[in-house]
Amino acid sequence: MAYAPETEALEICRDLIRIDTSNFGDDSGPGERKAAEYVAGSLAEVGIESQIFESEPGRASVVARWGNQDSPKPGLLIHGHLDVVPAQAADWSVDPFAAEVVDGYLFGRGAVDMKDFDAMLLSVVRARQRAGAIPDRPITLVFTADEEAGGPLGAHWLVEHHRELFEGCTEAIGEVGGFSTEVGGQRLYLIETGEKGIAWMRLRARGTAGHGSMGNSDNAVTHLARGLLALGEHEWPAEPGPSMQLLMAKVRELTGSDGTPDELLEHFGPAVRMIGAGMRNTTNATMLQAGYKHNVIPGEALAYVDGRYLPGHGDSFLPTVQQIVGDAITVEPYISQDALEYAFEGDLVDKMTIALHSQDPGAHIAPFLMSGGTDAKAWQKLGITSYGFVPLRLPADLDFTALFHGVDERVPVESLEFGAKVFDNLLSLL
């Protein structure tokens, strides 16, 4: 059979989607063990040994050494995660775990986040291993558990308990980036060079408990509502950092237009939801808790807020939130992870660019700061520079960013095959 690194990408992705690895953020999910065993078996089939590590029963990650381990070149970490967010089957047009192909799209939970990349990577590695085309660089392949809950049972656990696995690695490639969008009628591929910090907060309002039929000017629920309204209406200013400044420069080049960052962002259409969030701090209330009976005014009310801050804003973000919501509410840090940002330059960036041009010669490429977080936050603890690079050439009319954690999550089959070819070319350059 002729060497074709993309050959198995679709079937591997279908296999992985059919293994339910829903992560509910607690112990109620099925875990990643079955998927980890599938990955380990796929590697073993072509002679690559791997190890499965369980942080807790069923919460499994896979680690394998590949490439020329004797090379003097610095090690490269290539990683994907095996867990997915839950899916409500009633909301979908197809079974989210059936991995159906409809009108050229592979549907399923994880098709975009991120079993597509797991499959592309396995397809390329297996093809190269069979052909004896092993990269001349030490490579560590990692497929993690628990990324969708921040990684305490996955990447962060591996860093804490098995730091030796990453010895020699200086750079990493994972999600989210490498996908195309259309700006000024031209394809623009976005490579992730940074991530906002995570500042999940608990807002606590206290008041005077009492009977629901009586007047009460010290109502905890009312205090909380006022604070949340103020936070929801607060307009965080656009403060683009280095990555987003380069992206805006590329937008100006492609469109010939100028203006404020927000005006330039309009060229991304629906993708502005994610891309625009890399320009400013954000706060979104996500959960509320208050009261226990209809006619009892509670003495306390709680809200949980998903806060994300730009690099360099870690010290000022929570104090600013406290100022916005007012003194009647206490802002408590709940889960925190640092922001990160790396320069869009160097040998690996150059090779990612060349690899994209190998399959799309007219491609335009720019960095961006990602609104969410990935396992890169764990690798940062080891001093590893991380980039998001899951190369996908996408239809211009596809609202791709809405598919992350969305209903009817899907990826074009052609995009899977394109990504495998690009990634194979990248490995040939290493």
Image: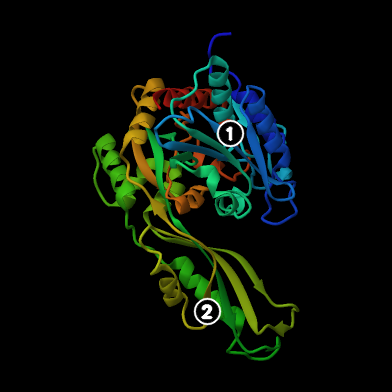
Left or right: 413 as drawn, with respect to 190: right
Three-letter amino acid code of the residue under disc 1: Asp
SS state under label 1: helix
Residue 18 horizontal/vertical position (percent)? 71, 34
- Evaluate whether residue 185 shows in this view: no
Q: Measure the alpha-carbon separation of dots 2 and 1.
A: 42 Å
Contact, mark 2 vs mark 1 (Cβ under 8 Å)? no
Q: Please tell me the numbered disc located at residue 118.
A: 1
Question: How many dots with numbers?
Answer: 2
Q: List the single residue furthest toward the front.
A: 70
Q: Quadrant of residue 410?
A: top right
Q: Residue furthest top?
A: 1
Residue 51, horizontal then vertical, whole percent: 65, 38
**Residue at 39% across / 58% down in the picture?**
310
Residue under the image location 29 percent in, 44 percent down = 246
Q: Of the residues tagged 2 and 1, which is closer to the observer?
A: 1
**Neighbourhood count class around disc 2 (C-alpha, 10 Å): few under 14, some 14–19, many 20 upward:** some
User: Which is nearer the N-term, disc 2 or disc 1?
Assistant: 1
What is the x, y in percent for residue 9? 59, 24
Name the amino acid, label 2. Thr
Residue at numbered disc 2: 330
- Residue 55: give x, y in percent of width and height: 67, 51
